[in-house]
Image (cartoon, coloured by chain):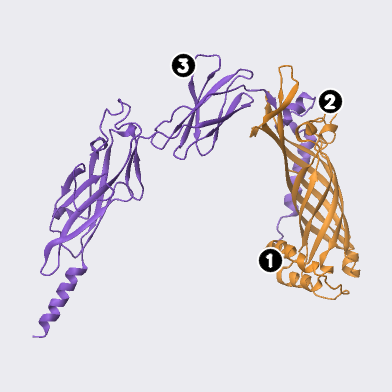
Chain colours: A purple, B orange
Amino acid sequence: MRLGPLLLLVISSAAFAQTGTLTVEFQEEAELVVGPTQCDATIPLNWTANVAGVSPCTGLSLWVTSRTACGDEAQSGDLILDGFTAAEISSGSGSRRFPLSNLTGISGGADAGSGCGALGFQQTFIGCGRFDVNGGFPATCNTKVANSSLPKLIYDAKAPATPVLDAVVPLDGALQARVTTGTDAVTVLLFIKETSAPEESYAQATTFSAEAGSGRIEGLVNGTSYSVKAFAEDLVSNRSEVSAELSGTPQASEGFFGNYRRLGGAEEGGCSAVGGGSMISALMLVVLGASCFRRRR
Amino acid sequence: MKKSRRNGWAVVGGLVLGLTSTPVLAQGSTVVGATTRMESPKNQMLEIKLGSIRPLIGEEDGLSGDPYEDAFGSSGMLLLELEMERYFYQGIGTAGVGFSVGYAEKYGRAQVIDGSGNITGDAAEATGLMVLPLRLHAVYRFDWAALKFNIPFVPYAKAGLAATPWWVSKGGELEQVGEQKAIGTRFGYAGTLGISFLMDFLEPRLARDFDSDLGVNHSYLFAEFTYADVNNFGRDGLNLSTRHWMFGLALEF
């Protein structure tokens, strides 16, 4: 008679304690940022579930939303993906892929063909998943196991801030451009033309990391005036407006050695600087040095 | 083998303790008379030193100016040097062989030149001269009076061969004039006269601990003057000769 309540307690405790877990993510441990150049891409939404000790009583629902929270189920405007059956949940993990352009707000043509979303558009999405397990006593299919993806999926079609071309510094056969960029810029592109050439002569000369702050354009002719302008690009290749144009003229210069040679210095540098007598000295230095400090046994 | 390892640690420890002992000296220690004690064997000296060198580049025959002065002005190059010596004689003084390696660099503005080759001003690019002086020399230290009669000054002399690898940069790269790359090595000879101050004299007990714990027999502060002719024994080319003072710390172990 006394075993009845005890058994009841044990069974009910086990039922309440085990609820299962679900993890949903676009990319493992990192925010997934996509841009207009990837509008043909398919995006994965991956899930893993731990259902040890519980029995899923519904299938797994998956959806992607631009709202800040998933809620209990997909709402109007959310992208609903094909689900998984209760039996498939027990396999522990799975994935569904969907075209980027299927997401709300990212529809082709809005930006006149250069991407899949309107220019300047930036939207954050979260992936959602849910299944139910039996819970309570007596067991009923009403215990929700859900998760929303963090990190998130960010569609970024917003151009970085227009860079500021601070200075074009004349170097020997080269120009150095110093550029200030916004925080979202990753790469700076420098374009150059001879100042006297028409506008359409601008050609990309070099790129450098926005973090570096300056880039060098080599192979220029000393004494010729060049015009330079810069663009900034972000992580997903959104390009900024063009900077203001600056001009610079490379100048021939000489360092210490050039000046030394011009003033009549006889040093020619390189290995030829080592004459016969000097070779003997060098050998003596090495041999004596090695023998003096060799460890005594 | 064990002795060698011990000496290696002594060098490192010596540097640390040698520097940290300075405040102790500054507190006004008592000078004590000569003491008789058992000290560990000594056969090496480590020196770390700093000084300013001004290569006599403008003295090269055939030069119509001083390119060092043009690029870097009149100030010298800060030279940091490490030297190891090994003793072969310890009697009335100490004699041995030493090897040193140093590094110095100096940066200035490159110069803009017009089509006629005239300098018209400073360029945005920097130019730098880098030297790596190497020396192998015989050394004699008159430490007999210091060890026997507690006179804390040890005069010394060094003479030997010098080799100085050098290179020049412009705009962050090795400078090249036509086909000639601005890199090479110059050789010569060098002599040094110096005087060391035996710091054990100020704090004998600390010095004894330094020896018994780490194997560093003596610590010195020193000043030395070097006369170096580094011009490939009078041949044409870059004259890296110097006449300079160096100051540093020496540990004998």
Secondary structure under the numbered disc 2 in the rendered image: loop
**Residue labelled with disc 3:** A200
Q: Chain of mark 1?
A: B
In which quadrant of the rendered view does residue B249 lie? bottom right
Name the quarter where the C terminus of chain B is drawn: bottom right
Q: Amino acid at mark 2?
A: Ser
The x and y percentages for residue B39 are 79, 71
Of circles 3 and 1, the one toward us is 3
- Residues beneath discs 2 and 3 located on the same chain: no
Query: Which of the two discs, 1 and 2, labels the residue nearer the N terminus?
Result: 1
Q: Which mark is residue B210?
A: none
Q: Amino acid at mark 3?
A: Glu
**Residue labelled with disc 2:** B64
Q: Which mark is residue B6?
A: 1
The x and y percentages for residue B205 are 79, 74
Secondary structure under the numbered disc 3 in the rendered image: helix
Q: Chain of mark 3?
A: A
Residue at screen point 80% across, 33% down: B69
Q: CA distance from mark 1 to mark 2?
A: 55 Å
Question: Can you see residue B131?
Answer: no
Of circles 2 and 3, the one toward us is 3
The x and y percentages for residue A149 are 29, 50
Q: How many marks?
A: 3
With A118 as the anchor, is A183 left or right in this view?
right
